[in-house]
């Protein structure tokens, strides 16, 4: 219980620090210097936390893939590994390249919508600290997916969006389920969005149950692992892990509805519509995540970067600036609940605090921090 108390106090401190820096930057007139400082500080914290990790849950498996002792089904990782082997590097350098690219692409995406990059980067770092380090192929694919979606929908630059899409698939084929998002964006009216996503989620849930029933998942090459016994969750555990993201989605919907009353033409803002649609897109995967937590982790939790960007972008529509601190407090409250569910609550209800254990192990393997 002593260690839990320490972690709880650390979470409180981090939450207050996030809130303070958010309010702090709101007090200053934005200029190139403050925006640059905000961005660089966020990126430095991101890299210090992740770049120098030397061990995690999947590290040994990645080393075997790097040495080609386990076949990697994702071509980009194989190509990078072969190139690095030829110049005498090991898996550590491959890992660091992935983290460098993820950090850069995350920052570039966030910078398209908000100047508070530090707040977003630190928030997603705390929530996704373990999976960002463990699932480097998928998170690089996800970062590339963000580029694909942005350039396809916002910039309408087809060629570069196709390049991003191809690279994301080559990094991890599991990203394909997110690549259908533009179809939702272009062919779903705003007033029908939540209803349709809910219908699709029920249909996908039923389909998944049928797949599990006939073991078809074991016949689908890349998705075989998703349907193995170790990834099939109890309904109780699946619901528990989905609660933080579900609450954030509800907050996004409530915020959107409140803004819509004051700004009827809100959806004419293409950036706003893009962020809102993508923030709630993962409703499709929530019920499936109840029985396959890996689905929830990959297609729901990852979108926290989009949801935070959406909320911060919505500040542009707030008439009275004194409402901004209230919105920041609301965001921080949601993040605080997320931190509790990740690191504290499992121990309180007699579940193994796996995320907390993995977090401590990763911090202990950080060569830069250990050097201090």
Image: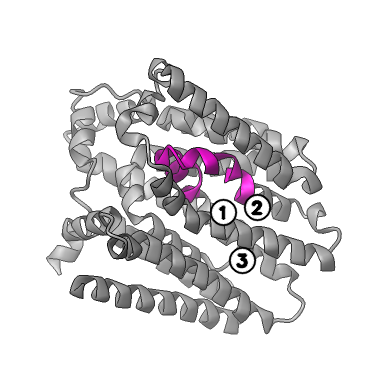
How many neighbours does mark 3 have within 10 angstroms: few (below 14), some (14-19), or many (20 or more)?
Answer: many
In reply to whether residue 15 is colored magenta, the answer given is: no
- What colour scheme governs how the chains and residues are painted in the rendered image of this protein? one colour
Q: Earlier in the sequence, mark 3 or mark 1?
A: 1
Indicate the position of residue 38 as horizontal and vertical percent values: 48, 70
| Most common SS among magenta residues | helix
**Residue that badge 1 annotates:** 306
Q: Is residue 254 above or below residue 189?
A: below
Q: Is residue 301 left or right of residue 356?
A: right
User: In which quadrant is the N terminus drawn?
Assistant: bottom left
**Residue that badge 3 annotates:** 312
Indicate the position of residue 129 as horizontal and vertical percent values: 34, 56
> Disc 2 and disc 3: Cα gap in Å?
10 Å
Q: Earlier in the sequence, mark 1 or mark 2?
A: 2
Give the quadrant of residue 226. Answer: top left
Identify the residue at horizontal 37%, vertical 77% (top origin).
12
In the rendered structure, are the residues bearing label 1 and label 2 in contact, judged by CB atoms less than 8 Å apart? yes
**Residue that badge 2 annotates:** 275
Q: Pick whichever, 229 or 114, lies toward us.
A: 229
User: What is the secondary structure assignment of the residue under circle 1?
Assistant: helix
In reply to whether residue 286 is colored magenta, the answer given is: yes
- The stretch in magenta equals 278-302
User: What is the secondary structure assignment of the residue under circle 3?
Assistant: helix
Q: Is residue 27 left or right of residue 194?
A: left
């Amino acid at each position: 219980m002593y260690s839990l108390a320490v972690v709880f106090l650390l979470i409180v401190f981090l939450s207050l620090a996030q809130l303070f820096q958010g309010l702090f930057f709101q007090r200053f007139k934005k200029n190139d210097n403050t925006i640059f400082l905000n961005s660089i500080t966020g990126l430095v914290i991101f890299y210090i936390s992740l770049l120098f990790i030397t061990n995690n849950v999947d590290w040994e498996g990645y080393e075997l893939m790097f040495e080609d002792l386990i076949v990697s089904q994702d071509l980009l990782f194989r190509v990078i590994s072969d190139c690095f082997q030829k110049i005498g590097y090991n898996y550590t350098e491959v890992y660091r390249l992935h983290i460098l690219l993820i950090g850069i692409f995350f920052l570039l995406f966030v910078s398209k919508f908000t100047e508070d990059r530090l707040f977003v980067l630190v928030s997603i770092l705390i929530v996704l600290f373990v999976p960002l380090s463990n699932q480097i192929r998928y998170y690089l694919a996800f970062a590339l997916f963000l580029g694909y979606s942005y350039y396809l929908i916002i910039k309408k630059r087809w060629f570069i969006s196709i390049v991003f899409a191809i690279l994301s698939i080559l990094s991890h084929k599991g990203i394909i389920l997110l690549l259908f998002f533009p179809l939702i964006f272009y062919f779903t009216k705003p007033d029908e969005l939540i209803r349709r996503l809910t219908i699709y989620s029920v249909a996908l849930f039923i389909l998944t149950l049928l797949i599990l029933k006939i073991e078809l998942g074991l016949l689908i090459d890349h998705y075989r692992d998703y349907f193995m016994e170790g990834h099939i969750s109890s309904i109780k555990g699946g619901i528990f892990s989905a609660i933080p993201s579900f609450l954030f989605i509800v907050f996004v919907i409530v915020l959107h509805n409140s803004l819509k009353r004051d700004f009827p033409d809100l959806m004419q803002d293409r950036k706003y519509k893009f962020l809102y649609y993508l923030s709630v897109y993962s409703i499709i995967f929530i019920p499936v995540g109840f029985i396959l937590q890996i689905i929830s982790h990959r297609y729901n939790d990852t979108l926290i970067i989009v949801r935070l960007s959406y909320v911060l972008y919505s500040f542009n529509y707030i008439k009275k600036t004194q409402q901004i601190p209230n919105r920041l407090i609301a965001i921080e409250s949601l993040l605080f609940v997320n931190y509790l569910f990740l690191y504290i609550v499992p121990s309180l209800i007699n579940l193994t605090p796996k995320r907390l254990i993995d977090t401590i192990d990763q911090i202990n393997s950080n060569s830069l921090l250990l050097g201090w």
